[in-house]
């Protein structure tokens, strides 16, 4: 790989629904450390940077990054697009990956699939993801963009949701960017039926249980391994089942032109 690829992991302690979630313990290490461990399992070569805020509450994130020997960038608390851009720029990125810190079960093989799609023909795409449309279980989010694409987005995006979520300006403007998407080769769509991400206490209990079941046997357990586990032990699936399909889209359906109500659950409980 000739181009410098950088994975930016946004992480902060001030999550509104589950404060401090990235530092919750999973088998003796923080959830953030466990996720970084999975990112380091990809076959493609990429640098990893944890992008956190300058807020004092995020000192612990910087300390954790140092502990696990990962570069840390500190920037704007609320403008995640700026934080994403500045972190990538600091590391001299040519290709930038966005992988949220709330995806500790992400399958490194899926990251490699999306990277394969991009690097098979780098001149073909400005942005490639597995989210538009999404087909993999929620929590396997991979977005790849050229630095030029990210820089243009950083310069032109202005709506609050674009600054907070960092990439909507790209996928909401397909006429401005060359966009690619990777779908699950099984032909299935589990994006609204399976939830491997963390936003609520029940999600943490689900993720913790999956790690306890699979990690001691196979450290690089796959998405398929998780699905097989849920087939064998459906009680694990039900730990956070009430939140399946819940995502940030539900709060912005009136602002997003490429997202429909079928891609989020508006009510739950």
Image (cartoon, rainbow, N blue to C red):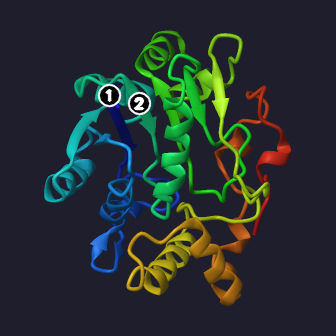
Instruction: State yes or no: discs 2 and 1 in contact (Cβ < 8 Å).
Output: yes
**Residue placed under numbered mark 2 in the picture:** 96
Q: Position of residue 13 (x, y in %)?
A: 35, 54
Quadrant holding the N terminus? top left
Of the residues under marks 2 and 1, which one precedes in the sequence?
1
User: Which residue is under mark 1?
Assistant: 88
What is the x, y in percent for residue 175? 71, 11
Which image quarter: residue 72? top left
- Does residue 107 appear to the left or right of 217 in the view shown? right
Left-right relation of 237 to 23: right
Relative to the observer, which residue lies in front, 124 or 68? Answer: 124
Residue found 65% across the figure and 29% down from its top: 180
Q: Position of residue 108 (x, y in %)?
A: 46, 56
- Depicted 25 relative to depicted 182: above or below: below
Q: Is residue 193 visible?
A: yes
Instruction: Tell me which residue sits at (42%, 60%) in the image.
Output: 19
Q: SS at mark 2?
A: strand
Which of 49 and 59 lies nearest the eye of the viewer?
Answer: 49
Q: CA distance from mark 2 to mark 1?
A: 7 Å
Q: Quadrant of residue 39?
A: bottom left
In this orientation, which residue lies closer to the viewer: 23 or 9?
9
Percent from the top left, x then y, of residue 123? 52, 16
Placement of 236 over or under 43, stated as above or below? below
95 above or below 153? below
Q: Residues within 10 Å of mark 1 (few under 14, many from 20)?
A: many
Q: Which mark is residue 249?
A: none
Name the residue at 70% across, 56% down: 246
Query: In the displayed structure, does residue 109 sit left or right of residue 3?
Result: right
Please indicate, yes or no, whether residue 76 appears anywhere in the rendered image. no
């Amino acid at each position: 790989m000739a181009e410098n690829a950088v994975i930016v992991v946004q992480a902060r302690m001030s999550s509104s629904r589950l404060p401090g979630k990235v530092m919750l313990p999973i088998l003796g290490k923080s959830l953030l450390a466990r996720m970084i461990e999975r990112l380091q399992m990809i076959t493609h070569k990429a640098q990893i940077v944890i992008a956190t805020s300058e807020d004092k509450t995020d000192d612990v994130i910087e300390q954790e990054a140092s502990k696990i020997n990962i570069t840390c960038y500190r920037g704007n608390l609320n403008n995640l697009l700026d934080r994403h851009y500045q972190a990538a720029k600091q590391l001299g990125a040519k290709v930038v990956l966005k992988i949220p810190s709330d995806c500790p079960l992400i399958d490194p093989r899926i990251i490699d699939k999306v990277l394969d799609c991009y690097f098979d023909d780098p001149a073909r795409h400005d942005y490639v993801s597995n989210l538009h449309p999404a087909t993999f279980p929620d929590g396997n989010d991979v977005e790849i963009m050229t630095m030029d694409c990210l820089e243009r987005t950083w310069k032109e995006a202005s709506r609050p949701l674009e600054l907070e979520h960092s990439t909507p300006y790209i996928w909401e403007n397909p006429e401005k960017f060359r966009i690619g998407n990777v779908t699950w080769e099984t032909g299935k769509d589990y994006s609204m039926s399976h939830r491997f991400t963390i936003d609520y206490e029940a999600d943490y209990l689900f993720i913790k249980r999956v790690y306890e079941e699979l990690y001691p046997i196979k450290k690089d357990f796959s998405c398929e391994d998780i699905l097989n586990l849920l087939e064998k032990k459906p009680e694990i699936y039900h730990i956070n089942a009430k939140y399946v399909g819940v995502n940030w889209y539900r709060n912005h359906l009136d602002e997003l032109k490429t997202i429909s109500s079928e891609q989020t659950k508006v009510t739950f409980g």
